[in-house]
Image (cartoon, coloured by chain):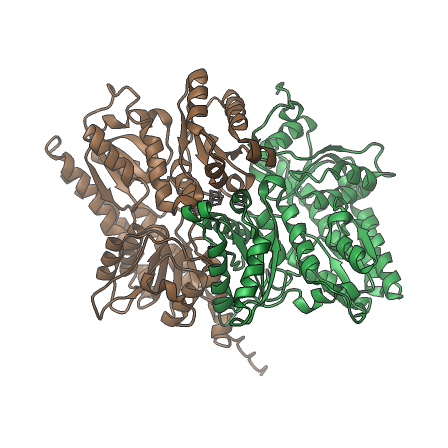
Chain colours: A brown, B green
Amino acid sequence: MDSIFEEREGQIARTGGDAFTIACNKDSLAGAVSQRACVFCGSRVVLYPIADALHLVHGPIGCAAYTWDIRGALSSGPELHRLSFSTDLQEKDVVFGGEPKLEAALRELIAEHGPRAAFIYSTCIVGIIGDDLEAVARRVSRDTGIPVIPVQSEGFRGNKRAGYEAACKAMMRLVGTGDTSEVPPLSLNILGDFNLAGEIWIIREYYRRMGVEVTATITGDGRVDELSRAHGAALNVVQCSGATMDLAAMMEEKYGTPHMRVSYFGIEDMAQALYDVADHFKDRDPEMPGRARDLVREELETLYPQLQEFRRDLEGKKAAVYVGGAFKAFSLVKCFRHLGMKVAVVGSQTGTEEDYRELARITDPDTIVVDDANPLELSAFIKEKDVDVFVGGVKERPIAYKLGVGFCDHNHERKEALEGFAGMINFAREIHRTVTSPVWGFTPRRRGSLKAPAMKEAS
Amino acid sequence: MTATPKAKRPNFVSTTNACKMCAPLGAAMAFAGIESCVPFLHGSQGCATYMRRYIISHFREPMDIASSALGEKHAVYGGGPNLKLGLINVIKKYGARAIGVASTCLTETIGDDVSMILHEFRKEFAGDLDLPELIHVSTPSYSGSHMDGFHGAVRAAVDQLAGDGEPTGRINLFPGLVSPEDIRHLKRLLEDFGLTAAILPDISETLDGPALEDYRKIPEGGCPVSRIRSMGAAPASIEFGRVLDPARSAGGVLAERFGTPLRSLGLPIGLRETDAFMETLEELSGRPLPRRHELARGRLVDAMVDGHKYLSGKRAVVFGEEDMCVALTSFLAEIGVKPVLVASGGSSGNLERAVRDVTDGILPEPPKVFAKVDFAEITEQARELNPDLLIGNSKGYRVLSRELDAPLIRCGFPIHDRFGSQRVRHLGYAGTQDLFDRIVNTVIEKKQADSDIGYGYI
Ligand code: SF4
Ligand code: SF4
């Protein structure tokens, strides 16, 4: 295909036919307008929702300006995370080193906002000029009495996944510093959920109904103190493919906290998440699996009839999915099945080879599977498969709209809760709204399919 | 609130909620206004992706910004090879006729010599590839904001492409960072005067395109490179922007190099600035103000009279790009709204003087002016000033408008929380009219919303 860069051929595959192979976790190709961001972006995404921490971006202004409150991560208390702090490095700082400015910035911001901890994000040029963030952090931490934690997130050191890892390392410095005497035995930590549009509150409520206490929500609606006692919880439940897996692994190694991977999107995955947790605790609370089943049954009773309504209009339609993490893509494939729809194109920014193999397994033959796509490819795939809706983020939206295709925002910037059973309804409603809108009948691709009715002749 | 405003604490070094973006973003927007041009950031992938996202949310249009996607080893050994590879990919896949290369903080810091790399590139590939124009601009963000990047790119395009040759009869117009609708309006206006112009950048179509049958790799429209090439032969250049220094602007380059007369004007918002622009057009075209615009002017004055009581004595805080701030302040003063604070993250050093100039003769004393500030400082000051209105980009909503319970009239860039920012018209009598109506209606809406009685007849 004309719009595919030869160097990227290995990162695109079609299911069916020969054995499935795909290359991934490569650096983005120069000149290819990747939809991917950088290490800093990965760290910022993960740590951002810790609401009572100071998030100081050490670098020139852009890196901080573009990440100012762009996500819908809600907090039930403090909202310090929604401000954008930067050292706004100037030429002289770049020449003479940015440490003095960083130190002064930290001191004044901590004095002004009284955060429970401070994260310092290192950006590309900080990596180049070689500021010693650890030394600054140590001094400021000693004087202010709060943890000050550098995040090794220079943008060029890899892609978003490397940023997740850096963020996890930073959080790990808080874990284990708090008192766990009050943490009950039937408790877990929610990892990797950003509380977009308050989603974590939905999930928390499910766990509460099952009889499990949530010790820490990492990172959505996050608190520094919760993180510090997170090691007291009996289980880590990790949502999403990459973001906090490293933290779960580190906690398992250091504190023996077991972890499980779940997805809260869609009916099967949401129910499975609850069953798995109940199963984990059934030795300590034999009633829990029963409560989980009741909960799922109750939720489905209200959910199902509504879904059927949407399905009537959506049956047989096709979707393209391009999201940040591959795990979310798995769930979306299943969600679409409930709507009677088929996923014809599926891809992610940061999937692993194993992820893509799984995607190939659960999709229909001749589905396009792609790693780290760009606008040219995405638009070509959308056209080739003639899809009815595209699921992606803000950067993907104009691609869909220009081609006269529906769109659903399923990234960090959305303001709609899509998790849990309630989220499945929201998702279905949104897909229904966009796919069934009459506007497509007026776009150039379908022009003429909708015309003004002729006036009746007067008699 | 008794704390000393941060703005008065000279030693504060950190920025909280910046009132500016970084330089390459501005450059990318300017390059997007050149025909068949792909903006290209020489740096790591993240910067380009962030800026795309930011620009896309404002214009709701595709915005492809290529990147040399530097990784760790390039940061150590130099990004030249990746820049070249990236250029080849953009040429082959996008079929770009021009590529605007802007450096980023990273490549400025590691010291890549972009101009030399491009020179090498041209030499290496001139035989095998049909090379597009390669324009480059140096945009380290640690020494300037997005507006410096914007003007830098416009200037670079002129500096690197323009020549003279046969007189074209076509004037040059450098409109600054205005909306696509503004550019469309300017085009019609020039037509009405019988003038043709090279408008740089021209984002009227590239950043506000129609629904399409197919995805276009590069959106249609933009200032043709051929027009930039002949800019030196134009009878005159018009450049908007009172804080813009002609010694470092595109119009200045043409004046110096080819003797093209330069008319520096404020952004034509409000009566006085628009009159000055119209007079310039009358002079350049030798025609009187066309009747359509004469009428528009008359209606505007009429509306200003009809609406003056709603506005007289209201207090406003203005913020955003410096030139937009100056023009809005000038207009507010004309309609009896008191600008109590004018604030920008920009650092031209000319803001205060420009504000003083445009309010002179109308306001008894010039408003307070803050340059190089962030929203934390603006908010602290604004809290004490108790404004009725805020005018600026949508970044002022959460921190200013909500906290002060003052309505925000959205102008400038970025507008991320309203629909139709591409179609907001600010310029000329018609744009001023739109703004005026919005302001009056905002005041009325607020009055209604705050009232317990709910008057339906105001
Ligand atoms: S590194 Fe510089 S160019 Fe890149 S986003 Fe940050 S400020 Fe902008
Ligand atoms: S400078 Fe580096 S850290 Fe900042 S946005 Fe660009 S790639 Fe990311």
Number of marks: 0
> As rendered, which of B46 and A252 lies closer to the eye?
B46
A98 shown above or below B209 = above
In the figure, residue A391 lies in which quadrant? bottom left
Image check: A229 left or right of B410?
Answer: left
Q: x, y percentage for residue A180? A: 25, 21
B5 shown above or below B424 = above
Q: Quadrant of the N terminus of chain A?
A: bottom left
In the figure, residue A189 lies in which quadrant? top left
Q: Quadrant of the C terminus of chain A?
A: bottom right
> As rendered, which of A245 and A218 lies closer to the eye?
A245
Image check: A357 left or right of A200?
Answer: left
> As rendered, which of B286 and B41 lies closer to the eye?
B41
One can see residue B411 in this view = no
- Residue depicted at x 35% and y 48%: A418
Q: x, y percentage for residue B200? A: 69, 60
Q: x, y percentage for residue B266? A: 78, 49
B308 shown above or below A459 = above
A296 shown above or below B66 = above
Q: x, y percentage for residue B262? A: 82, 55
- Residue depicted at x 20% and y 46%: A272
Image check: B268 left or right of B373?
Answer: right
Image check: B361 left or right of A108?
Answer: right
One can see residue A106 in this view = yes
> As rendered, which of A62 and A338 lies closer to the eye?
A62
